[in-house]
Amino acid sequence: MFLFITTVLTAWHLTAGQGNPVVNINNGAVVGETVRFTESTYISVDKDINVFRGIPFAEPPVGSLRWQNPVPKSNWVGTWNATYYRPICPQALPSKTGNEEDCLYLNLYAPAQVPVEGAAVMVFIYGGAFNVGWAHQSTYIGTALAATGDVIVVAANYRLGVLGFLSTGDSASPGNYGMYDQVATLQWVQDNIAAFGGDPARVTIFGQSAGGCSVGLHVLSPVSQNLFQYAIMESGTALTPFAYNGDQNLAVSESHRLGDDLNCTYSTNEELMACLRTHSAAEVLATALKFTFLSAPVVDGVFLPDHPETLMYTENFKHTNIIAGTNKDEGLIFGLAEFPAAISGVRAPTMDRASYEESFPKYLRGNVNELFKDGVRNQYIDWSLADETDADYLEAFNRQVTDETFVAPTDAFLRYYTSSSKGGTTAYSYHMTHAPSVSAWQINLIGPRWMEATHCEELQFVFGWPFLDEVQNWKSKNLNSNEKTLSVQIMKNWTNFAKTGDPNSADVPDWSTFTVPELEYKEIAVGLPTQRALRADDNYFWNSLAPALKACA
Ligand SMILES: *[C@@H]1O[C@H](CO)[C@@H](O)[C@H](O)[C@H]1NC(C)=O
Ligand SMILES: *[C@@H]1O[C@H](CO)[C@@H](O)[C@H](O)[C@H]1NC(C)=O
Ligand SMILES: *[C@@H]1O[C@H](CO)[C@@H](O)[C@H](O)[C@H]1NC(C)=O
């Protein structure tokens, strides 16, 4: 048994230092590192992948460039050392070292041998509520995906929090800097990817959570539409409640609050911004974190010409092929604050009626009146058990938060998108129900183990975590063999979509498109069954009835 395990564990590995590829891009030469990716049991690959870490795609956004759209990087003399990761953008993680404002770097994973017609490209946009995250998190290493699908994977940092999204609502600081960093990444790919063997006409953007929201916003933005071909939205679309800040007054008052707390004296927003620029990034960030700074994209009239609902409704979006999906238990991680004692628990906590009554309204958005609250109770409480004193309301709470924040907005996005009168839109949808045997949230076996198919769990399948040393080094426990097979299937579906706009391959078509009225989607579970009409009555509740209830009283 031990020998068997050892064999399985050594069936894949990355060996570093087999070469240092040099590529000439528009700014000058870059040198990376070739790694060997070998996996003989599940993927059957043995390939060289050229990894480039820390290529600058814009000038450092410091000094007068802070709170400005990214400026193209000027050329360099000699060879840029792209063998190590550069700093992450300043963010709200207290102990994270290596945060610097000079953070606009990207990482690239390219098969050494690419098809003659050029490799399809997948640009990943990380999540983290527009406040945290970075491109070289071990969870987003692109080597396995590149080796499995013969695609080039690119992941770039973008500015976060107050440094990425501060908006005065006027030209002093229009906001959306983080989004323009993503746009600059896509422009960089258009300008440079051919040098790595990539095909600039086949670029898929994919992202998760706030990254999925970002992808959705690029689908809507006239600025981004010509810079990519296909889009994948994992647990976030342009209609997800946290995708953007629709309250411009709030954004403006927060920028003023920041200035006030930093003792700025100003009578115009230009004076405010001049004062804010005299403070260090660390000071600005720490001050903003003392109050709830709502860092999110705003309607700036350029990147986002109007509210996402309006752009969807008026069909102002890129007509192309998309994948959009959600996970069954996203709400549990979002509601974790309700169960502080269960943070590293093995078993799910129970939620009695009293704690349910206290918790569930906190997660409702908009005008939370009694009628709306009772509508939610009616929709989610299992009334056949509600008279039992020990009835557990955790699932009611989980489903509410999952549906309100993820499932219903994704359903609305898919319906608008696929019902376009202009045609030319093809959508595939998925819903992950499989609870991984090792949670994405477990690090060295610490972390909650009761969250089933919660937020982020699909990432380990999409990026092939079971096949990456970088992940296994800190996970210390791997997925089982069925799950490894599932991961390879998903990597193939994702990369096939990047190549052709269809997750299926010609010989095995199985994932049908999402259309109204069929409403078909792929269930991400072992065997990948096809299902239809995901939570249709809950979607009706959130997208049709809830707005009417909120409008009462
Ligand atoms: C690139 O940087 C790494 C890490 O600092 C260093 O070990 C290596 O020698 C550098 N390579 C070149 C060509 O300068
Ligand atoms: C702002 O002024 C107050 C009152 O003088 C002072 O306590 C505080 O330290 C100042 N804050 C900054 C960031 O300078
Ligand atoms: C995509 O997944 C389906 C199952 O949903 C599978 O049958 C198919 O082979 C996969 N496509 C590719 C290209 O691997």
Image: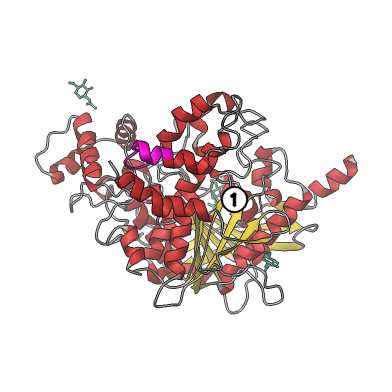
Q: Is residue 62 visible?
A: no
Q: Which residue is mark 1?
A: 459
Residue 366 located within the stretch drawn in magenta = yes
Q: Which residues are magenta?
A: 365-374
The answer to whether the beta carbon of the residue marked 1 is less than 8 Å from any atom of ligand 3 is no
Residue 12 in the image, given as x and y percentages of width and height:
76, 53
Quadrant of residue 436 within the rendered picture: top right
The N terminus lies in quadrant: top right
Q: For this view, does 272 lie left or right of residue 20?
A: left
Q: Is residue 522 visible?
A: yes
Which residue is drawn at the image coordinates 34% and 32% (left, top)? 289
Which residue is drawn at the image coordinates 67% and 77% (left, top)? 506
Q: Is residue 393 above or below residue 453?
A: above
Q: How many marks?
A: 1
The C terminus lies in quadrant: top left
Which residue is drawn at the image coordinates 30% and 57% (left, top)? 307
Residue 440 located within the stretch drawn in magenta = no
Q: Secondary structure at mark 1?
A: helix
Residue 383 in the image, given as x and y percentages of width and height:
56, 37
Q: For this view, does 396 lie left or right of residue 49?
A: left
Which residue is drawn at the image coordinates 72% and 54% (left, top)? 526
Residue nearest the observer in this picture, 273 or 73: 273
Q: Please say which color scheme the image uses.
A: secondary structure
Residue 419 in the image, given as x and y percentages of width and height:
44, 71
Residue nearest the observer in this picture, 330 or 298: 330
Residue nearest the observer in this picture, 494 or 237: 237
Residue nearest the observer in this picture, 328 or 257: 328
Q: How would you rate the neighbour count of disc 1 (Cα within 10 Å): few for under 14, some for 14-19, many for 20 or more?
A: some
Q: Is residue 252 above or below residue 386?
A: below
Please name the amino acid that badge 1 sits on: Leu
Residue 43 in the image, given as x and y percentages of width and height:
74, 60
